[in-house]
Image: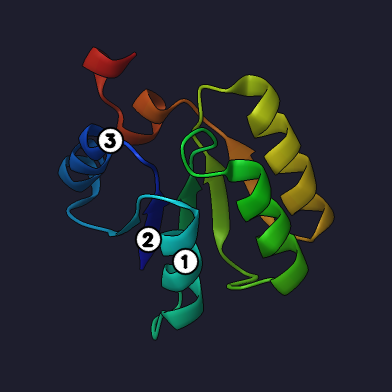
Amino acid sequence: MILLVDDCPRRHAAFDRAFGGHAGAQDFASAIIAMSESRWLIAAIYLDHDGVDGDLLAEWMAQLRPHPYAKIVIHSSNYVGSIKMRDTLRAAGYDVEMKAFAEVVADEALM
């Protein structure tokens, strides 16, 4: 299962077009619920920073380590926030990378 955490409905729609579906969360609280209550292994988690309290979410994930083997992709356009999230999650042992959202969904119109 793939989880997309982003507050933008257009990004969720682009993600569906690119990947054929996903589990979604639009804010900090729904992301925690999705990660905590998932009955399925989450293989990849795509994280935004702004609008979803990215710093708090990264700290929560670092402390509780839900889905510790998930690939984490930070797709936020907030570079400073993304770096902080990346460093927090890497320190907790997650495999983390940063990519522009348009690159994630391979959408030329978003680049």
Identify the secondary structure beneath mark 1: loop
Residue 21 spot, x, y in % from top left: 20, 56
The residue tagged 2 is 2
Where residue 99 appears, as percent x and y from the top left, is 52, 30
Q: Are marks 3 and 2 in contact (CB under 8 Å)?
A: no
Residue at 48% of width from left, 56% of height from top?
Answer: 45
Tell me if 20 is positioned left or right of 98 in this view: left
Residue at image point 31% right, 34% down:
105
Query: Pointers 1 and 2 in contact (CB under 8 A)?
Result: yes
Q: Which mark is residue 11?
A: 3
Tell which of 104 and 37 is nearer to you.
Answer: 37
Measured in 3D between alpha carbons, the distance from the residue under mark 1 to the one under mark 3, in whole angstroms, is: 19 Å
Q: Nearer the viewer, mark 3 or mark 2?
A: 3
Q: Position of residue 51 (x, y in %)?
A: 46, 37
Q: Of the residues under marks 1 and 3, which one precedes in the sequence?
A: 3
Q: CA distance from mark 1 to mark 2?
A: 6 Å
Q: Is residue 15 above or below residue 34?
A: above
Q: Residues within 10 Å of mark 2 (few under 14, many from 20)?
A: some
Q: Is residue 24 left or right of residue 69?
A: left
The C terminus, quarter of image:
top left
Sequence order check: which comes first, mark 1 or mark 2? 2
| Residue type for callout 1 | Ala
Pointer 1: what residue?
A: 43
Residue projecting furthest to the right = 91
Q: Which image quarter: residue 54?
A: top right
Q: Indicate the amino acid at tag 2.
A: Ile
Q: Which color mode does the image show?
A: rainbow
